[in-house]
Image: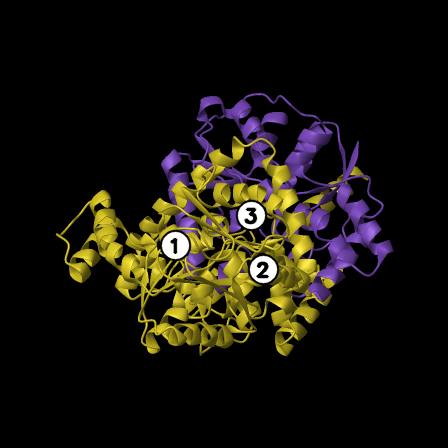
Amino acid sequence: MKVSLFLTCTADLLYPASALACVRVLEALGVEVDFPRLQTCCGQPWLNTGHPDGARRLALHFLEIFENADTVVAISSSCADTVRNHYADLFPDSPELRYRMEAVGKRTFEFCEYLYKILKLRSIPAHPRSCATTYHSSCRTLRGIGLRGVAEGYLARMFGDDFIPLSESETCCGFGGSFSIKLPEISGRLMADKLRNIEATGASQVTTLDLSCLTHLAAGAERLGLGRIRFLHLAELMADVVTK
Amino acid sequence: MHERPHNFRIASASAVTDEVLRAAIRKTADSLLSRRASCTADYPGFEELRDWGRSRKLEVSGRLEQYAREFADRVEAAGGKVHFARDAAEAVAIIVRLARERGARTAVKSKSMTAEEISLNEALSRAGVTVTETDLGEFIIQLAGERPSHVLAPAIHRNRAQIAELFHQTIGTPTDLDVKDLVRAARAALRQRFLTADLGITGGNFAVAETGTLVLVTNEGNGRMTTSLPPVHIAVVGIDKIIPRISDLPGFLTLLTRSASGQPISSYVSIITGPRKQGEEEGPEELHVVLLDNGRSPLARGPFREILHCLHCGACLNHCPVYRAVGGHAYESVYPGPMGDVLSPLLWGMETYPDLPDACTLCGRCAEACPVRIPLPEYHRKLRILRARGQVRLTLAAGVSAAAAANPSLYRTGLGILRQILIDGRELFNGESIGAMENWMICRNPPRPRKGPAFRAWWRERERKRS
């Protein structure tokens, strides 16, 4: 098994430890990981703000980098969703590009999705340092790539009763990319609701598969004096288990 | 319908901190959406029914004019009269003329968003006709002098205590009535109005082309009284409400009531074909259907065609995090929530509603709930593209930033600088913050890069050690 890692700009900028953990987990599971160094961003910021020309540019760059990869593993759900579910539609007038974008999209997976669907990972040992943990499911994980219950299943195995599901888990955290700065008061309201639900679980760590929600929630928690809560990518907790 | 450009941030500023408002909206919206969830889960084949609904609606939106013509012919064959209205002004003029010709002084009205769309109540009242809203929610907001804040539950923004106080102030009921007594009080106030009204005004949930049948879905029975007691019934119906055949009705009713209120069927479904016929004992002497276009025909030919498929069930509103946070009035349009974000700029112009395409986190819950699978998040994206065409500087900046981001070395350099600023230059964000960060900082601290080496440096080092 060989995969090419799609770092994503958020991990590149803010969460190198999440990316490192992904590599460790994949390698511990016998996967050979390649990191194409000329990769950049998936283009989502342009796609979602009405600039399809910009998005096309990044999509073409992604294609150039990853077209020959067997499998692409992305560290964030929304980036995997962009590549898989939106790239082809950016090229309505070119059947050839549509086809190639669809092809690379079909081979692109979010990290946890890859473990579950391709590696068929079903069981995972208990975490060595169990503590109250919850999970933010993220809209793009649920409704973008359509992954439900998978991360929760791994967390239940790793943390047993210490895994506490989040209430209102289908509800958006209020990030929404440009939404977070265009309508910051509403974004902050939704964020506060999400953080209140997180607080109510009593968890000391929150995990997710989407690093952009993570950025927003962690920065908001710091502002609201909830700095004691750690925000982590699921891979970081899995890395503790598979590489201990 | 809105004079200055709508500014969503300003219009929602007071709502976003109003805990009472939020609690009222959440209470009703949660009850509607949980009933919807169980009511759709226990209907086998609901997902296939959604596909079917979409395909039937595609059939109609593909031949809107033909179906409108067929519907009109059938209504007239059944003894009714159809008036085509190109826009709101025409529709209002037709209805005011009908009222004047009949010397009408009073009208009872069953809930209609289409009538709201054309501001019918204001026009009739200027023409000397007293209009009484007979749907409980509409009755409440009419007493309060407000606009509906939800397409299904117009008074969703008010809680019981506020309504009890309103009734006390306006119709003189005792203070602090419970829900049952509030309903009783409204019924008592309305009964006489029904019996004496000169006109009954309704919308229409469905208009069946094949038979010229108008279908009204209500839960309070007010729709039936409105269409049977007054001598004249006037229905205002958007041409998008047409469905091809009477055999399509059960499927659409199922989609509508299960999605809207989580009911297998509403308490009342009025199926009206023509006015009272000879020998019949009930029904109005005259039936007029005002078929409203108001910008719908061009939509059917464009990239937002499926927004015309909307059943006005309100499920997208109930599921929308933004709507739930601020309520309907902040949208300053008849149509709030996700369907309104799309419809308002299309019907009344992007220059009037420039912010609504942004009133969406692209979370996708609306699309999951929509009974006819309107691609609402995708439409928000498309509207942002339309809007960007008028923003030259922004488009230029987007082009430059995309070119830089697609250039590996520029991308790496830029990201590296930003990372260093976020690690070592955090004091830059204290006090006077800059640009986009200013808005970010309203509710958050600057993003904090996780400790440890940058991934690319770590990878490079590892490769070096390996070779």
Q: Earlier in the sequence, mark 1 or mark 2?
A: 2
Write down the chain letter for disc 3: B
Please determine whether, in this image, residue B313 is positioned above or below residue A53.
above
Mark 2 or mark 3, whichever is nearer to me: 2
The amino acid marked with disc number 1 is Ser
For the point 78% across and 59% down, which residue is it? A92
Q: What is the crowding at mark 2: few (fewer than 14 residues within 10 Å), some, or many (at least 20)?
A: some
Please determine whether, in this image, residue B341 is positioned above or below residue A109.
below
Q: Any mark on residue B370, and which?
A: 3
- Residue B215 image offset from top left, x and y in percent: 50, 51
Confirm whether circles 1 and 2 share one chain.
Answer: yes
| Chain shown in purple | A
Disc 1 versus disc 3: distance between alpha carbons? 32 Å
Write down the chain letter for disc 2: B
Disc 1 versus disc 2: distance between alpha carbons? 20 Å
Please determine whether, in this image, residue B318 is positioned above or below residue B335.
above
- Residue B362 image offset from top left, x and y in percent: 56, 53
Q: SS class of the residue under badge 1?
A: helix
Would you name the residue on which mark 1 appears? B228
- Residue B143 image offset from top left, x and y in percent: 26, 62
The amino acid marked with disc number 2 is Ala
Q: Any mark on residue B77, and which?
A: 2
Q: How many marks?
A: 3
Given residues B144 and B16, the one toward you in this image is B144
